Image: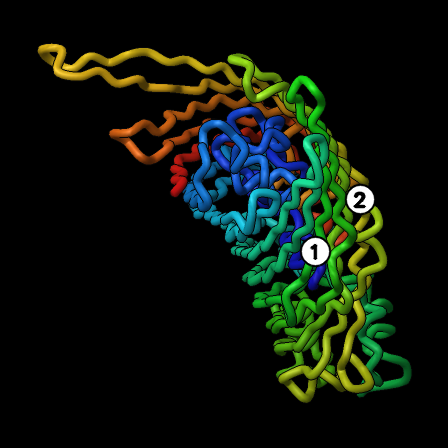
Amino acid sequence: MCKHIIIIALTMSPAFSQQGGEITGESPLTAGTAGASIGSGQSILDSSSNPSTLIHVFENSRSGRFDQRYEGMLRSVHYNTSITTAAGEELESDLPIGMGPWMGYASRIDDDMVWGINFQPTVAGDFSASRNTTLNLVTDDPFDPDSPLKQSRVDISSKLLQLALEPNLSVRMNESWSFGIGSSIRNTDMLMSSATEVDFDKLQGDFVLGTGTWGDFFQTAGGESFQATFDADASSSTPTVFLKLGVTYTDHLGSNIGFWFRPPSTSSDIEGRIDVDMRDDLGTFITVLGDSGIDIGLENELVSGYDFAIADVRFPAQAGVSYSSPATDTTRWHSKAVFTQWSKSMTGWTAHLSNPSNPEFADFIGGDGSLNVDMGIEWRDTLAVSTGFEHDISFNITEWSDRYKKVNDYTLRGGLGWSSNPVSGAALPGLTPFNHWQVSLGMSSWANDRDPLDVHMAFVVTLPETWTAGENALLSDLSYDEYTQFAYSFMLGCSYSF
């Protein structure tokens, strides 16, 4: 029953494909090149991936000899998704446009050292849909053995927000080498409602009308599982923390070659409450038994709340490399490759449900009413690569009557990115966590004496993609759904050096 909740926390990002599994540290300058210019040292937010680039921001000719810099960005993201179930139902999903701020501040300590701090969402999402599911026990006509199983309408929704505070330090060692160290401190809050299937072997309480367990009785009566709905509210017990290390080498031509490594995060429990309701399937089946003269004594045992915890959740290690041609070139080329080790972080997770609010629930489940749920998550390692370019243009604007002239400097950007899919088989209801390809465009208007702010914008589109999900271990009705999806994202921001 908790399986959806944790998968949501890690895949529901509406900009998943744009940062190799995360939306960390993507300014309009970087987004305009599909993430490829992350090692060029143009944006404070690039230090969220490679902290060594932070000092390059102050060495960039655009920043001059200023000692402090502020960046503020607003990003909107919208996914256009159509879902066709294996049964042929076209789902109407509600995926509203999401918006969030990205902010960064950095300051010189001396000529060879800079510190900074970024605040940004790293995962966010809001999804809702309603779909038919097939109950496991209840038929349209309970007295007709050939009657088909009854359909149930289930509302599926989820809301998620993960925020990060990221301090960074960058040091210039010599003309060629700069090093950086940083951290990412993240907290997650989420809401989730859906349905799941519960195996009868979970019902280990003693059967009141005979020998064996409740599970034995229902398996004898027919069926291996039943469907239950749930509503969940969860958050991190403590923030998770990443350490980040980075290095940038600048060759004699001025090209930047960057490397960064992020070990796995610290571990943290995901804790919250789940309200479980078994009445639609198991409850209706028991009512039918009662109408047939078989009273098994179940009245209030089918609804209960639970505490739950998934212990020692850690997020994955990551390594990346980037190349940017000299900043002095009018046309610059960038590339990036990022490897994220999801397979080591997304295996062997077990959710522990305890302290049922309904005391009769414990007699039904057995023991103290606690349950351990194998989450069955299986992810692959991912590789994300991108390439992009920038081109500088400038022109004079002459005011009326030739009273004065000013020069406007602009940078135009474009990029293409590709990412592999981390999820093996099953997908979330209405949320495919990736598109292979993305295309981006961007532009900056640089400050001059009359206009002190740099203004940046970017537009990113993930190319439409159709694919069929695999088998879903949580709810079989979600297996083999067909997803067609594309996303678009717009970023607008400014930077100010002083």
How many discs appear?
2
> How are the residues colored?
rainbow
Q: Position of residue 451 (x, y in %)?
A: 28, 31
Q: Does residue 429 appear anywhere in the picture?
A: no
Q: Is residue 96 above or below residue 463?
A: below
Q: Position of residue 161 (x, y in %)?
A: 53, 56
Q: Position of residue 232 (x, y in %)?
A: 59, 66
Quarter of the image with the C terminus in it:
top left
Q: Secondary structure at mark 1?
A: strand
Q: Is residue 146 left or right of residue 75?
A: right
Q: Residue placed at 46% from the left, 48% from the top?
A: 103
Q: Residue placed at 76% from the left, 44% from the top?
A: 261
Residue with the mark numbered 1 = 242
Residue 187 disc label: none
Q: Does residue 284 appear anywhere in the picture?
A: yes
Instruction: Return the residue nearer the eye: 55 or 422.
Output: 55
| Separation (CA) of disc 2 from disc 1 | 14 Å
Q: Is residue 341 left or right of residue 166?
A: right
Q: Is residue 62 above or below residue 103?
A: above
Q: Is residue 276 above or below residue 212?
A: above
Q: Residue placed at 33% from the left, 11% from the top?
A: 395
Q: Secondary structure at mark 2?
A: loop
Furthest residue to the left? 401
Disc 2 marks a residue whose amino acid type is Gln
Counting residues from the N terminus, which is met first, the one under dot 2 or under dot 1? Answer: 1
Q: Position of residue 104 (x, y in %)?
A: 48, 48
Q: Residue placed at 57% from the left, 67% from the top?
A: 233
Residue with the mark numbered 2 = 341
